[in-house]
Amino acid sequence: VLLNAAGFVDVIKTNVVITLSYLHYLLLSGFLITRLLLLLLLLLLLLLLLLLLLLLLLLLRLLLLLLLLLLLLLLLLLLLLLLLLLLLLLLLLTIIIIIII
């Protein structure tokens, strides 16, 4: 029974390594990063269009322009934070794979 349980644990360990390796490959190949960046870019463009419509409706008030600039800076910071999180995830997956193997 102990031998069977050890074999079962080994199978689970192998499956975890394969799954983590695949995630690691996706991150390294840039597939996941490019998809996320394209999605973020699309959302950013939609938000910019919406904000431009608001600007046109309110006849380019100075206060609204400042708010738009602040919002754009905030979005850029969020994008940088997301990229940093992706890099940390890549590093963490690399460390986990090295530890398991």
Image: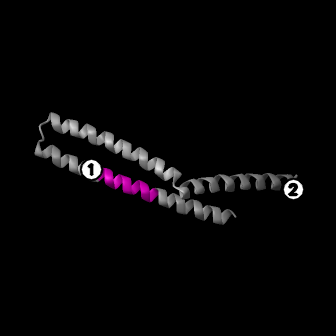
Using a 10 Å C-alpha cutoff, classify the residue at mark 2 as few (fewer than 14 neighbours), some (14 to 19) or many (20 or more): few
Residue 72, which numbered label?
1
In which quadrant is the C terminus drawn? bottom right
Residue 15, which numbered label?
none
Q: Amino acid at mark 1?
A: Leu
Where is residue 48, by image quadrant?
top left
Q: Is residue 89 magenta?
A: no
Q: Is residue 79 magenta?
A: yes
| Residue 9 placement (x, y as % from top left) | 77, 54
Q: Nearer the viewer, mark 2 or mark 1?
A: 1
Q: Amino acid at mark 2?
A: Leu
Q: Is residue 70 left or right of residue 63?
A: right
| Residue 28 placement (x, y as % from top left) | 55, 58
Q: Main secondary structure of the magenta part?
A: helix
- Number of numbered discs overlaid on the protein picture: 2
Q: Which residue is mark 2?
A: 3
Q: CA distance from mark 2 to mark 1?
A: 59 Å
Q: Earlier in the sequence, mark 2 or mark 1?
A: 2
Residues in magenta?
74-85
Q: Residue at x 68, y 56 (%)?
A: 17
| Residue 39 placement (x, y as % from top left) | 42, 44
Q: At numbered mark 2, what does the secondary structure look like: helix, strand or loop?
A: helix
Q: What's the colour scheme?
A: one colour
Q: Residue at x 14, y 36 (%)?
A: 58
